[in-house]
Image (cartoon, rainbow, N blue to C red):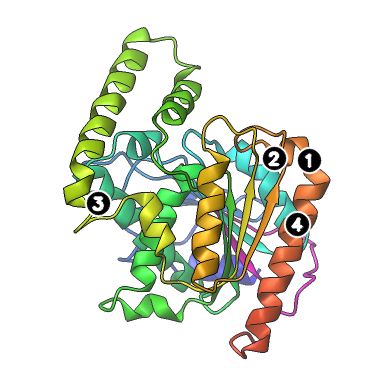
Amino acid sequence: MAVLRKLLCVAAPLCAGGRAGITNPLLSSTIKSIYLPQARSALFPVPRRSCSSVPQAPQIQIHRLQGASSDFEDDPVVILLGWAGCREKHLAKYSHIYKKKGCIVISYTAPWEDIFLISLCTTRSLHGTAKKLLDLLFDIGIEEHPIVFHVFSNGGCMLYRYIIELQYDRGATRYRKLNVVGTIFDSGPGDKNFQGGIRALHSILRPSNNPFIKIFATVTFVFVALIRFMLYPASKFWSLSLYDSLKQDPSRWPQLYLYSKSDKVISYKDIENMIRARKQLRVWVESVDFDTSQHVNHFREFPEKYSIRVLSFLKHCIGQSTGTGRSGKKHLPM
């Protein structure tokens, strides 16, 4: 019950199965209510945003499987950053891989508008979300646990970029205390792939029956992409593209890249170029080419192989962390 007690420290008293307002000032602008069902997951609905607030998002969720015994000396924290248009039910299967091994799992997906319709407004929004996601780790008291990010497509990479920037911001020393031990990239990151972006946007808009929304979103995306492409030769001197910023990512913890040569949204060549760039910086890198699976479909088509590789990587990262003396015995009792 330790996780629940720590969560209750940042919330007003709850009635059984009820909701209450967040009292912690760090979270009050992001999280309006907290729900603690019997399965020990906490759902954090995010309010609608203006340009200066945190974005509307499906939910930040914290899970720990009841009765699961940890396979690790410490209770690892795995943070899933979903792809654009991803729903919680899509991330649930990935969450289960880690929960059954005793991990604490946090999942979050940024709104698709913030991914495809990039502007100063959405950049601030993603930066604010990254900050509050990291603050949440401190409020729950799990910042010293080994932390692994599992990042999906460019949608997850966009939020991950700002998480890294915060950790290496000289003015935000608080975040350097986080015990991040590794990152897994699934189907990303990709470089300027205009055709792949259109495909991804259409897949997100497919459930909509409103043709105006589809046309407006597509035209806006094309316009924004063209403007950014034309301005990038000059703008890169003060703001790198997502792809270039991750190439130069100052972190040096291990990375695992999961991709496929059949991916029609993000080119495998972009991912292989990224792998080479990170290795040149002496980052320990693993990669798996699933060859035939489509974008963010590797687990669906190869569930056993996928699970084995991510859990093996998780164990390696935690072993490396223990070897450097950063990790101690950190368990959250059931």
Helix, strand or loop status at disc 3: helix
Q: Do the residues under discs 3 and 2 have CB atoms within 8 angstroms? A: no
Q: Residue 319 appears in which quarter of the rendering? A: bottom right
Q: Looking at this view, is 32 or 153 the one in front?
A: 153
> Which residue was labeled with disc 2?
298
Of the two numbered discs 3 and 2 on the same chain, state the one appearing first in sequence. 3
Percent position (x, y) of residue 291? 71, 38
Amino acid on which the number 1 mark rests in the picture: Phe
Give the amino acid type for the residue marked by disc 2 in the picture.
His
Q: Residue furthest right?
A: 304
Name the residue: 48% across, 24% down: 199
- Tell me residue 115's x, y (percent): 37, 39
Disc 1 designates what residue?
302
Q: Which mark is residue 124?
A: 3
Q: CA distance from mark 3 to mark 4?
A: 35 Å
The amino acid marked with disc number 3 is Arg
Among the two numbered marks 3 and 4 on one chain, the one whose residue lies closer to the N terminus: 3
* Residue count near mark 4 (Cα–Cα under 10 Å), binned few <14, some 14–19, many ≥20: some
Q: Which of labels 3 and 1 is toward the front?
A: 1
Say whether marks 1 and 2 touch (CB < 8 Å).
yes
The answer to whether 252 is drawn above or below residue 289 in the figure is below
Residue 272 appears anywhere in the view: yes
Q: Quadrant of residue 164?
A: bottom left
The disc at residue 309 is: 4
| Proximity of marks 1 and 4: CB atoms separated by less than 8 Å | no
Q: Give the side of residue 75 with respect to residue 139, left or right.
A: right
Q: Earlier in the sequence, mark 3 or mark 1?
A: 3
Q: Which residues are magenta?
A: 61-81
